[in-house]
Image (cartoon, helix red, strand yellow):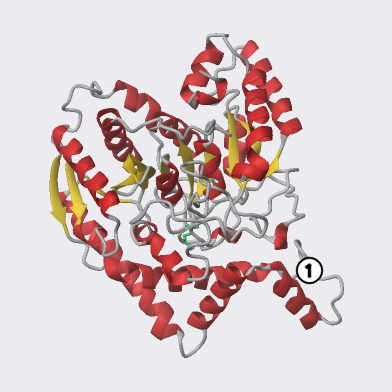
Amino acid sequence: MELTDLTAVQALGRMRAGEISSGELTRAYLERIDRLDRGVIQAYVTVTPEHALEQAHAADERRRAGDEAPLLGVPMALKDLALTRGVRTTCSSKMLEEFVPIEDATITRRLYEAGAVLLGKTNMDEFAMGSSTENSAFFPTRNPWGDLNRVPGGSSGGSAAAVAARLAPFAIGSDTGGSIRQPASLCGLVGFKPTYGRVSRYGLIAFASSLDQFGPLTVDVADCALVTGVIAGHDPLDSTSLDAAVPSYSDALNDNPPVGSGEDLRGVRIGVPREYFVAGMESGVEQSVRAALDVLRGLGAELDEVSLPHTDYGLAAYYIIAPAECSANLARYDGVKYGYSAPDAESMWDGYYKTRGRGFGSEVKRRIMLGTYALSSGYYDAYYLKAQKIRTLIKQDFDVAFERFDALVAPTSPTVAFKLGERTDDPLAMYLSDVCTLPVNLAGLPGLSLPCGLSEGMPVGLQVIGKPLDELGVLKIARAYEHAGGWNGRRPDLAS
Ligand code: GLN
């Protein structure tokens, strides 16, 4: 076994036992990145070797001094929309190509305090708008599974590809409509979007503020619980952050029922939303998900079908609300405050046109135009207001379902990873990638994707959706399934 095969929990065990140092572990990742990233997987926009080795040595010092911080010495990758002081943060946009933040995002700070070591910043769809990472202004990222000509999903595709290719033991992504769960599904990983407000958004470069949420991409549920525990919690710097106690997810999973007893989920009521088995779903995906439902039943869970009747309107409502918020959030890129500024501007207006015309890619421009239109007087009532009403109905569907069920289980993505270029000319086909994930964002719920099989040799994801703030309930179901389903921890063999 190579050092880069270790999960975060396993690496921590070896470091605690004094068998390896963070310095060694970090160097192993940096060497692998050198070999396999640029020109092959292309998961990273920026690699930070000096920074990483400095943090690794500091972590080794801390451990020698008796420090037992929860991620002490574990390397990680951050999606390139999490602010990192002194490290370029681009959002995979020309607009921020040279942007070096003067402060850390709250999660960056929390992860550093927990002892994590930054390997670099990962590629994404520009400003997190997309489902394939092909909207990056720099280069596409490849899915490490299969013949390397498929997308890793998006928008956190760089984070997912980095973990799947063992170029980082875990990574952070962000999820506005599915951008953690869908790439986790397409790359065979565990990806978790916590409850809206559970994790601080301070220092997350905003796309749609009422939907955006940070979360981890990991190899298994134990790592997911560990990282979620580190990043969750109230933050006075984010006014939407929830002031609710955070249970120790890792301890709770460890103390809890004997995994492998075969009855780990006895009495847990799980709803299966009928509407998530959408038309156009690949049969291999449906088979894997249905087989996973049988596994959950075998573990003692009580499964029943449930209807979330407004699901059909989710996509339409999301593609009004998210662009509307983006059109406001992205107004700040005006060439004056920070970011790209057209050097040849002849007047104030000319400066805006040139800066925004050149700095943003076509998908970002499309979203700004959609959003501005939906918010404009005369159309506001017809589009934005109606979308907000649908959002409430979608939330109510979940509320009703949660009167009967402890959690819901559904597919994450209707298809496995598609080919690079396959959907780039058809925005609507791309938008449809997220039909199963975006209602969860509209309702602010926790949603996790974990691997449940292969179809055409590519990973399939199972989505577990929980009640608000019930991250622990979601993690318990995921771990029980992971143990019984036998799909955890598989990563593609890149040697071939
Ligand atoms: N794919 C969706 C979009 O393009 C969701 C993106 C996200 O979650 N950041 O908006």
All told, the count of numbered labels is: 1
- Residue occupied by mark 1: 336
What amino acid does circle 1 point to? Val
- Among all residues in the image, which is located at the extreme front? 496
- Among all residues in the image, which is located at the extreme top? 18
Label 1 beta carbon within 8 A of ligand 1 = no
Q: Quadrant of residue 128?
A: bottom right
Q: Residue at x 26, y 65 (%)?
A: 279
Q: Is residue 248 visible?
A: no
Q: Residue at x 75, y 72 (%)?
A: 355
Q: In the displayed structure, does residue 365 sit left or right of residue 211?
A: right
Q: Residue at x 47, y 20 (%)?
A: 10
Q: Mark 1 Cα within 10 Å, few/some/many (few <14, many 20+)? A: some
Residue 95 place in picture, x, y as percent: 71, 63
- Among all residues in the image, which is located at the extreme bottom? 378
Q: In the displayed structure, does residue 408 sit left or right of residue 451?
A: left
Q: Is residue 30 visible?
A: yes
Pick the residue in front: 399 or 347: 347
Q: Residue at x 84, y 82 (%)?
A: 347
Residue 350 place in picture, x, y as percent: 79, 81
Instruction: Label 1: state its secondary structure.
Output: loop
Residue 278 place in picture, x, y as percent: 26, 62
Residue 287 place in picture, x, y as percent: 23, 47
